[in-house]
Image: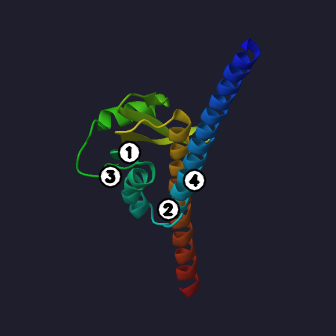
Amino acid sequence: LFAFLATAVIASQLSERARRETGNANDRRREVERLYSFSQQLLSTDNTAELLNTIPRYIVDSFGVRSAAVWLPNRTDVYRSGSNVDGLELHELQLVHARGEARIGQQVSFVPLRMGVRVVGSMGVGGTMLSRETLDAIGGLIAISIERAGAMERLSRSEAARNSEQLR
């Protein structure tokens, strides 16, 4: 009787662990799917200004956060998902950019936008807790997409200048 009881307890613990690991794997899979969808949205435009205006809305739509904000040091505006500030203050975004370190809180989180080791801006999200890894991945994707859009704009300007010079 004791052998059966011990076997039942061990089997229930193993099945609970397997169920928990399955749930974690499904959560990670959904997170990867969201990141993939987000990256596809970021690649949809080559215009930097349009991209900066739509990134916060993409974050809200893709990850279910209440609000998002993006700030770049070479731009005067803070690009927000909506009209509410929701704790995503300009000062905090500037501070995260200057330090280059993420600040993860209960309701509001800030991460630097990194292009390799160079910090190109900062991002804040409010409302829902996302893992640090997810926030870092979002920040990296945003930095890459901003650099890509800027490179595409520079390429088109140089191509236009070259055509103009050739026409002249």
Tell me, yes or no, whether the two marked residues, 2 and 3, touch with CB atoms within 8 Å: no
Q: Amino acid at mark 1?
A: Val
Q: Are marks 4 and 3 in contact (CB under 8 Å)?
A: no
Disc 3 marks which residue? 81
Q: Residue at x 27, y 52 (%)?
A: 82
Q: Is disc 3 in contact with disc 1, using a CB cutoff of under 8 Å?
A: no
The label number, if any, that marks residue 86 in the structure image: none
Q: Amino acid at mark 2?
A: Gln
**Up-down: is 16 above or below 41?**
above
Which mark lies nearer to you, 2 or 1? Answer: 1
Quadrant for the N terminus in the image:
top right
Determine whether label 4 and label 1 are within 8 Å by CB. Answer: no
Q: Determine the residue located farthest toward the left in the rendered image.
A: 83
| Residue at image coords 65%, 26% | 12
Q: Earlier in the sequence, mark 2 or mark 4?
A: 4
> Mark 2 or mark 3, which has the lower sequence index?
2
Label 1: state its secondary structure: loop
Q: Earlier in the sequence, mark 4 or mark 3?
A: 4
- Look at mark 1 in the image and give the residue it sits on: 65
Residue where numbered disc 2 is placed: 41
Residue 33 is labelled as: 4
Q: CA distance from mark 3 to mark 1?
A: 10 Å
Q: Position of residue 8 (x, y in %)?
A: 69, 23
Q: Name the spot of residue 6 as percent of width and height, x first.
A: 71, 16
